[in-house]
Each structure stands twice: as structure tokens, then as C-alpha cells.
Image (cartoon, grey):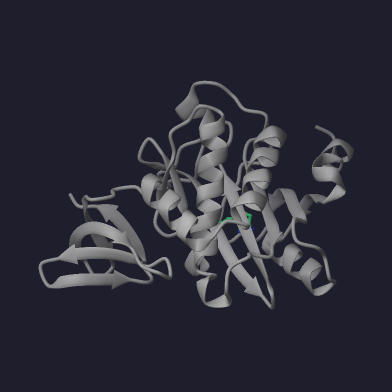
């Protein structure tokens, strides 16, 4: 697709960049300039794409999607932690729409076949939230040590990036109008390792995932009782 064709997507609410540092930073600047909810920044290349906890984010130009959406969630400010899970839900529903069976790995990843296909970085800016989404659409070459998968690898065929972007954008807009209760139920249905033993790293605590708390926390029953996990370096199925 040409830059012009990209820019015509989403009724003119899309800002397309060949190269940028991070689309989350671009979206933040747009929020500060008063951009409306639903505005999206997409980049073919990010020179400083970032993930949670300062990790680098790699996106294969021409194969992956790296974009940030400005949201104005309906729910109260103290529920905004649901935004990452809500964005994961929107990505899942979009992938389900093309026949895939994704899951949400708490708190901000989407998995296909037990491997990461999408990472989400949510940042609050005043009354707005920026949801940065990195999705492996086609191809399948990842930096050494990265255990990831693309939609193409999981689905056995390639996907049109612009159609996938539009699907996710529509689901995001729709999910941000749902109640926290609805989102919680839909996330729980898709949660990876639900009712299964997990290990929470780096502490190494273990237990069974039994639910989601009112603020999107992960509830884990372990030997020492109920753990309310609000932040995890990393979570994995218990070996
Ligand atoms: C993670 O897995 O830790 C989250 C990765 C989020 C990556 C996306 S790509 C688009 C947006 N811009 C960034 O710099 N990061 C997010």
C-alpha cells in the first residue's frame, strides 16, 4: 500500500509515518495538540519502539504492524488499568474475526499457539489513554531469543495489514464503550492459563489462576494463600 492509501483508512483519522521513534510518543504529542479519540498513528519503522518496563520493541517493516490509538475510555479513572486488558480483548476479537483462536496473556500480551503475537503498551495522558500495539502479522523472523509467532505462521496464510488494522481499530472503539464488568467477563473467557498453575517471575511464586480483581489484578491461589498480582515481570505456565 502507498502512504496515500494508508492515510485514507479510518475516515482520515490515521496518521501514517514511514519512520518515527515511537508511535506512542507521536500519539502523546497529538493528544497534547487536542487530537480526538480514535486517532491512530501507524509507522512502518520505529527507531525507538518500546515495550513494558523499558524493553525494546522490534517490528519487521512491511510484515508487522506498529501503531498507537488515542482512546477516551468510558470507565472511571481508577479502572483505567483495564485499558491494556481491553486492548488485548479488542485484538483477540479482531483475530477471532479472521478465524484464529488467540488468548490474552495477563496483563498485556496476546498469544497464538502459546507464543506471543502481540504486545500492548498503554500510557495515560491527562483524560486520554494511548494504546500502543505491536502485532506480528506476516513473516516470522524475530531477533534471537525472542519467542514469538506471526499470524501468518499460526494461520498458514498471509494477512492484509490494513484490513487487520481496521478490524482492531473498530473493536477498540467498541470495547472502550463497554462496562468494566463486560470487559472482565470477556477477558476471563480468553485468559491464557485460566484455572491452571502459573509461576510469577522474578519472585518465583506459584499458584493457580482463579480470577480477575476489580481493577484488573490477577488472582492466584498459591500455597501461602491468595496472591493479588498487580504487576508481574513475567508470567509463565508452571513447568
Ligand atoms: C510489550 O510487549 O512490552 C509491549 C510492546 C508494545 C509495542 C508497541 S509498537 C507501537 C507502540 N509504539 C511503541 O513504542 N510501543 C508500542
Name the residue furthest left.
223
Name the residue furthest top.
157
Residue 77 image offset from top left, x and y in percent = 58, 76
At a point 71% along the width and 66% down the height, the residue shown is 25
Q: Nearer the viewer, residue 179 or 172?
A: 179
| Residue 126 visible in rendering | yes
In which quadrant will I find the N terminus?
top right
**101 left or right of 130?**
left
Question: Within the image, what quadrant is residue 56 found in?
Answer: bottom right
Residue 201 image offset from top left, x and y in percent = 28, 64
**159 left or right of 34?**
left
Q: Is residue 229 above or below residue 3?
A: below
Q: Nearer the viewer, residue 145 or 67?
A: 67
| Residue 55 visible in rendering | no
At a point 54% along the width and 36% down the height, the residue shown is 95
Ligand 1 found in image quarter: bottom right
Q: Nearer the viewer, residue 94 or 44?
A: 94
Question: Within the image, what quadrant is residue 198 found in?
Answer: bottom left
Residue 12 image offset from top left, x and y in percent = 87, 47
At a point 68% along the width and 65% down the height, the residue shown is 72
At a point 85% along the width and 44% down the height, the residue shown is 11
Q: Nearer the viewer, residue 220 or 213?
A: 213
Q: Is residue 63 above or below residue 91?
A: above
Amino acid at each position: 500500500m502507498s502512504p496515500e492509501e494508508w492515510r485514507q483508512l479510518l475516515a482520515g483519522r490515521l496518521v501514517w509515518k514511514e519512520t518515527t521513534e515511537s508511535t506512542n510518543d507521536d500519539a502523546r504529542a497529538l493528544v497534547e495538540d487536542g487530537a480526538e479519540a480514535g486517532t491512530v498513528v501507524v509507522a512502518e519503522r520505529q527507531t525507538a519502539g518500546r515495550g513494558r518496563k523499558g524493553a525494546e520493541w522490534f517490528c519487521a517493516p512491511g510484515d508487522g504492524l506498529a501503531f498507537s490509538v488515542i482512546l477516551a475510555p468510558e470507565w472511571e479513572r481508577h479502572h483505567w488499568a483495564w485499558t491494556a486488558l481491553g486492548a488485548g480483548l479488542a485484538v483477540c476479537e479482531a483475530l477471532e474475526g479472521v478465524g484464529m483462536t488467540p488468548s490474552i496473556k495477563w496483563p498485556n500480551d496476546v498469544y497464538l499457539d502459546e507464543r506471543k503475537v502481540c504486545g500492548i503498551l498503554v500510557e495515560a495522558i491527562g483524560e486520554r489513554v494511548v494504546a500502543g500495539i505491536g502485532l506480528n502479522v506476516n513473516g516470522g523472523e524475530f531477533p534471537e531469543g525472542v519467542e514469538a509467532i506471526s499470524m501468518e505462521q499460526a494461520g498458514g496464510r498471509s494477512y492484509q495489514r490494513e484490513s487487520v488494522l481496521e478490524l482492531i481499530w473498530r473493536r477498540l472503539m467498541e470495547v472502550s464503550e463497554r462496562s468494566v464488568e463486560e470487559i472482565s467477563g470477556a477477558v476471563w473467557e480468553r485468559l491464557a492459563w485460566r484455572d491452571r498453575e502459573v509461576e510469577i517471575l522474578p519472585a518465583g511464586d506459584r499458584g493457580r489462576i482463579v480470577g480477575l480483581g476489580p481493577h484488573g489484578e490477577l488472582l492466584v491461589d498459591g500455597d501461602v494463600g491468595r496472591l493479588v498480582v498487580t504487576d508481574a515481570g513475567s508470567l509463565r505456565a508452571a513447568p
